[in-house]
Image (cartoon, rainbow, N blue to C red):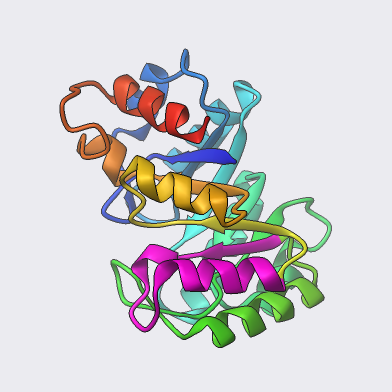
Amino acid sequence: MDFIFMLTRDDQTVEDCLDVFDTIRETSVWHIGFKDIGVEQDTLAALNARIKSLEAISYMEVVSTTPEACLNSARTALEIGVDRLLGGTEVAATLDILQGSGIAYYPFPGRPQGHPTRLHGDPADVAADCRRAEALGCAGVDLLAYRAADAEPLDLVRAARDALSGELIVAGSIDTPERIHALAAAGVDAFTIGTAAFDGSFSPRKGSLRSQLRDILAACA
């Protein structure tokens, strides 16, 4: 299972993301992402270029809350050349924007609302959205399992896993080794952590960001 380190806090890219990236270059994190809000597009482009210079895989996650803003974020992803785009629910229109780019797309199943995002919908809703996304040509989905408002998180994970042949990424509020282990047991392919690394809550007795990342990677093993 892959760990995607998001250079984000409270669902926004941190303002000093370029400086943070430079401090983690020597870690063994090879999947690195950011949100579509928090800094200007020029900064996102520079960050994406640095990630790819490390030969890591770059991710941008959409947390915009209107359809048009989500599609503008997809256009941003295309312009800066990320490897993978996460989030959003305008699946067909987003795929049209990304067509021919080689960018893999993982939309949100269910009904994400608000910011920070809460996920509405039951396991049947999530499974149906997963099947629909895959039929349209998505590489998988980005499930906000631990932001669930209407169901148990692992019930949503299992429903998504059963419905998908592609990749299942779980994002949001993953802040303990126990949650990582539960996701691995449920067949998740990758998960994201941002805030829990930056605020030190993943390993509360350790003080550095590198220590947080090392402990998250150890939990994956």
Q: Please provide percent x and percent y for residue 137.
A: 80, 69
Of 219 and 173, the residue lying toward us? 219
Of 178 and 42, the residue lying toward us? 178
Q: Does residue 218 show up?
A: yes
Q: Is residue 20 left or right of residue 59?
A: left
Residue at (48%, 85%) from the top-left corner?
122
Please say if 169 is above or below 178: below
Residue at (37%, 64%) from the top-left corner?
146
Query: Which quadrant does the N terminus fall into?
Result: top right
Please say if 208 is above or below 168: above
Q: Is residue 200 left or right of residue 39?
A: left
Q: Quadrant of residue 85?
A: bottom right
Residue at (30%, 36%) from the top-left corner?
197
The number of numbered badges drawn on the structure is: 0
Q: Quadrant of residue 19?
A: top left
Q: Please provide percent x and percent y for residue 37.
A: 38, 56
Please say if 155 is above or below 216: below
Q: Please provide percent x and percent y for residue 204.
A: 17, 33
Task: Please tell me whether residue 143 belongs to the stretch shown in magenta.
Answer: yes
Q: Quadrant of residue 205?
A: top left
Please say if 75 is above or below 90: above
Task: Please tell me whether residue 142 belongs to the stretch shown in magenta.
Answer: yes
Q: Magenta region: which residues?
A: 140-163
Of 48 and 184, the residue lying toward us? 184
Q: Is residue 96 left or right of residue 10?
A: right
